[in-house]
Amino acid sequence: MSTAADRARSESPTQAPPRLDLRAAAGSGIFEYAPAPESVRPAIADRYGLFINGRFTDPTSSKRFTTINPATEQTLAEIAEANEQDVDAAVKAARAALPAWSALPGKERAKYLYRIARRLQERARELAVLETMDGGKPIKESRDVDIPLAAAHFFHHAGWADKLQYAFPGREPKPVGVCGQIIPWNFPLLMAAWKIAPAIACGNTVVLKPAETTPLTALRLAEICAEIGLPPGVVNIVTGAGATGAAIVNHPGIDKIAFTGSTEVGKLIARAVAPTRKRLTLELGGKSANIIFEDASIDQAVEGIVEGIYFNQGHVCCAGSRLFVQESILDTVIAKLRDRMRTLRVGDPLDKNTDVGAINSKAQLATIEKYLESGAEEGAERHDCGSGELPAKGYFCRPCFFTGVQPSHAIAREEIFGPVLAVMSFRTPEEAISRANNTPFGLAAGVWTDKGSKIFDTARRLDAGVVWLNTYNKFDPTSPFGGFKESGFGREGGRHGLSAYLA
Ligand code: ADP
């Protein structure tokens, strides 16, 4: 029996086969991938203690809080809440370990860092899954970015430990002392590595506090420190929320504070530290600009811009959350942006095909939603993207971009920390630079152009600690990272980062 389609084909044999409409195909689900969930499930204890002086101990307060999986809202573990007394015990352990650790020859300290790095690599899969479960980021990011980079930071700083006098000729490098380190939830293990690796390579000892919503991988790192035989007290990890952080900041036995987090808390810390002899580095918020000139390779630029805003659900202090497009290519860029962003798969972070995972917490989702409302109220037009239904449970947000944005709109001025992009246009390079710099922040920027001279001229005039040229969100332990203005001061990575841990 011949069908109508067969008949049509035989009636017009010379007609070219219909072209496959890729856009319609993606929308119709032809290219939907089968689920590819990560099969490993790391063991998670019911409750965790504080890592002080080389072993896990119960908090003196007996207070605990829970950490949950933001993609399922299920409780993962109970976490100890360190009070002032616990922080004091950690600082005392770090102080007691300092003389022997700082006196150790650099090449001996390096061996411990190499061991940590190798152990991170050996346990990479378990750590990646744990990071995704605790924080909500897609497994492909924790697997390909967070954990390998964390190991790379230990390898890199292991290499410096016995070469500090060559890094800073003419200066006799000495450790600062006991370092209090407070980190956020967006890159939990990686931020711990950024802080701990240079500190201990330079002979300091450490009291580190992970964020309250993502403590699990830092606690695994504590286990690794014990496993590889790091001398007790060199690394202490205390868990808790803001009050625990404040106890570290205010402890008189701390010589240096290194903080990564919100500008609001950064300002509190700067005030608390100002009348003391403590040294301070701050890596705070951002509202980074991506600038596309009309001579840029547009497809390449759109790929970088999309990655700059949806990477880690936009939970990146250097996320390219403001996009400035030269007016002549605005319509083309918006069309391409819409096409590319609608293919992003939002959903189960443990699925290997997921591009956009869960928002880290209910509170953060509420913050993002508040900005989405304010964008619409102030008159911008929202374009929702991402394919598929959002999961019924968990904290999810569809990536989106706004057009018709004015520089005065809150979505163009304030850090959202979510997958929300504000698109604006400019006519001349001068205008692009002045609009990009018109922000209290100064963390990062991206410039997209084919012209080398324009690259260097623009990069030089942007008030940003990091400027990526024809690329975005590239991190490497050899490259210093840090901000200007309200994005903080001090650098992490490279020789500049080492310098912050030497007296
Ligand atoms: P975010 O808005 O990204 O959650 P926060 O600045 O609130 O950033 O948190 C970053 C880190 O700072 C977390 O580890 C948090 O517990 C800690 N923290 C929060 N409040 C304080 C404070 N007053 N003093 C010290 N640390 C704090």
Image: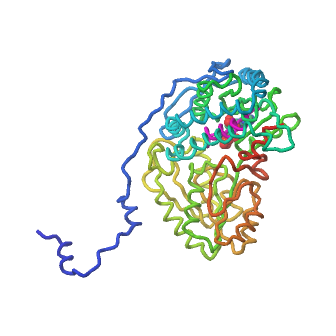
Indicate whether 139 appears above or below 66.
below
Quadrant for ligand 1? Answer: top right
What color scheme is it? rainbow
User: Which image quarter holds the C terminus?
Assistant: top right
In the rendered image, which quarter is residue 454 located in?
bottom right
Q: Position of residue 106 (x, y in %)?
A: 74, 33
Q: Nearer the viewer, residue 83 or 175?
A: 175
For the point 29% across and 75% down, which residue is it?
Answer: 17
- 438 displayed left or right of 218: right
- Above or below, comparing residue 416 to residue 187 in the picture: below
Q: 78 or 397: which is nearer to us?
A: 78
- The quarter of the displayed image where residue 256 is located: top right
Up/down of 480 relative to 4, above or below: above
Image position, residue 187 (x, y; %): 61, 42
Q: Please name the residue shown 68% across and 34% down the image.
A: 110
Which of these two is toward me, 205 or 21? 205
Q: Residue at x 63, y 22 (%)?
A: 63
Chain part drawn in magenta: 179-199
Residue found 57% across the figure and 73% down from its top: 331
Residue 266 is a magenta residue = no
Q: Nearer the viewer, residue 149 or 300?
A: 149
